[in-house]
Image (cartoon, rainbow, N blue to C red):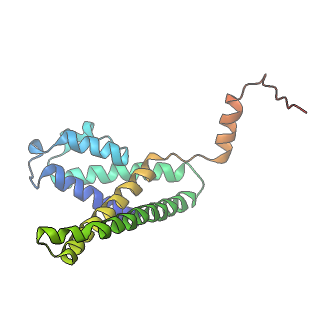
Amino acid sequence: QVTELIKEQLDEMIEHYSSGKENPNSWDWDGLGEDLIDTFMLEISSSKDKVGSISDLKKIMLKGVKEILDYKRKSIDEGIFDRYQKMVVLTTIDNKWREHLHSMDQLREGINLRSYGQKNPLNEYKKEGYEMFMNMMYDINIETLKRIFRTNLVRAEEQAANNKINMPKNLKMKHDS
């Protein structure tokens, strides 16, 4: 499921920053680079010279994202990363859905004012509700990907070892009786 989100998001980024043009010189490389770093923590400016078409760009981006996911998957116990991804997806959906329901309630409370502007409140509610739903879906995808790619999971043993190293040895605890 996350793989499909990644492909969809990469396609949207490519479409947005290439504006459908095949010539790489006319693309917004700065915007694409910032968006890739922000969402996937992926830096592709060194590969810019290797890109001759949209398909080349997509291959480079997919390869980079796959390498990041493989590293994250290998750095912790098997199966934990997959469970983490599921948890992130479900948590993000839950949070965004709650926000969406709250926004829909606010829209419903204020929609009757549209009749003063000679507009049908029901049609306006449907139209704006649909736009809000589509924005929520996009936000869910982006938020999910950002959480997955920005989080570094570590094994419990590594964390314990790091904590022991950083703990001062001369620390004494005293409790008042």
Q: Is residue 129 above or below residue 92?
A: below
Q: Residue 101 or 78: which is nearer the viewer?
A: 101
Residue 26 lies, in percent from the top left, at 9, 44
Residue 23 lies, in percent from the top left, at 8, 48
Which residue corresponds to the image point at 40% horizontal and 62% vertical from the top-left? 99
> Based on the displayed image, in which of its 4 quarters is residue 107 positioned?
bottom left
Looking at this view, name the residue that lies furthest to the top.
170
Q: Residue 149 or 63: which is nearer the viewer?
A: 149
With 126 as the anchor, is 71 left or right in this view?
right
Which residue corresponds to the image point at 53% horizontal and 58% vertical from the top-left? 84
> Based on the displayed image, in which of its 4 quarters is residue 9 positioned?
bottom left
Q: Residue 88 or 128: which is nearer the viewer?
A: 128
Q: Is residue 115 above or below residue 159?
A: below
Quadrant (top left/top right/bottom left/bottom right) for the N terminus:
bottom left
Quadrant (top left/top right/bottom left/bottom right) for the C terminus:
top right
With 88 as the anchor, is 106 left or right in this view?
left
Which residue corresponds to the image point at 31% horizontal and 70% vertical from the top-left? 108
Residue 3 lies, in percent from the top left, at 38, 62
> Based on the displayed image, in which of its 4 quarters is residue 123 positioned?
bottom left
Which residue corresponds to the image point at 43% horizontal and 65% vertical from the top-left? 98
Residue 27 lies, in percent from the top left, at 13, 45
